[in-house]
């Protein structure tokens, strides 16, 4: 029996992803490079960044044009397995 994967999203759609990690110089650029590998039409100018209250961490929100669940799954997997990334929402 084949199990069909379902999602509540309708593709394509605008999809925000929040990535948190230590506030180091290369963190934002690294995150953008990963997102661009999975969403080549992503515009880095739309990245929103917010430091934590004590300034030790950085939250980055990337809103991309998601084309499929497989695309989002692959992006989440690569981001969450990156050593600089602490949390992906």
Image: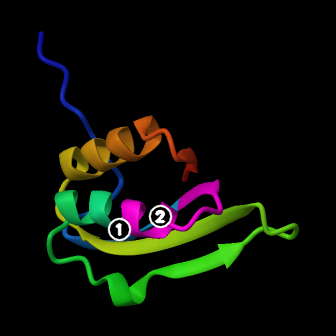
Q: Is residue 58 left or right of residue 44?
A: right
Q: Which mark is residue 77?
A: none
Identity of the residue furthest to the bottom in this view: 45
Mark 2 is surrounded, within 10 Å at the Cα level, by few (under 14), some (14 to 19) or many (20 or more) other residues, namely few
Say which residue appears at 65% left-offset and 66% top-offset. Answer: 58
Q: Which mark is residue 26?
A: 2
Q: Determine the secondary structure under disc 1.
A: helix
Nearest the eye: 81 or 15: 81
Say which residue appears at 26% left-offset and 43% top-offset. Answer: 74
What is the CA distance from the residue labelled 1 to the residue labelled 2? 10 Å
Say which residue appears at 47% left-offset and 64% top-offset. Answer: 26
Mark 1 is surrounded, within 10 Å at the Cα level, by few (under 14), some (14 to 19) or many (20 or more) other residues, namely some
Q: Which mark is residue 32?
A: 1
Q: Determine the secondary structure under disc 2.
A: loop
Please tell me in which quadrant of the rendered image residue 81 appears: top left
Where does residue 21 sit, x and y in percent of width and height?
61, 54
Where does residue 65 sit, x and y in percent of width and height?
25, 73
Where does residue 62 sit, x and y in percent of width and height?
43, 72
Q: Is residue 46 above or below residue 61?
A: below
Sequence-wise, which precedes: disc 1 or disc 2? Answer: 2
Q: Is residue 66 left or right of residue 80?
A: left
Identity of the residue furthest to the top in this view: 1
Please tell me in which quadrant of the rendered image residue 50 appears: bottom right
Nearest the eye: 57 or 69: 57
Q: Is residue 12 left or right of residue 81?
A: left
* Magenta part of the chain: 19-31
């Amino acid at each position: 029996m084949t199990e069909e994967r379902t999602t509540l999203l309708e593709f394509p759609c605008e999809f925000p992803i929040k990535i948190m990690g230590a506030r180091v110089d290369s963190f934002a650029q690294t995150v953008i490079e990963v997102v661009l590998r999975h969403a080549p039409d992503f515009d880095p100018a739309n990245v929103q960044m917010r430091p934590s209250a004590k300034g030790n961490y950085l939250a980055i929100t990337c809103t991309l044009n998601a084309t499929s669940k497989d695309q989002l799954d692959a992006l989440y997997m690569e981001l969450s397995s990156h050593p600089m990334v602490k949390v992906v929402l």
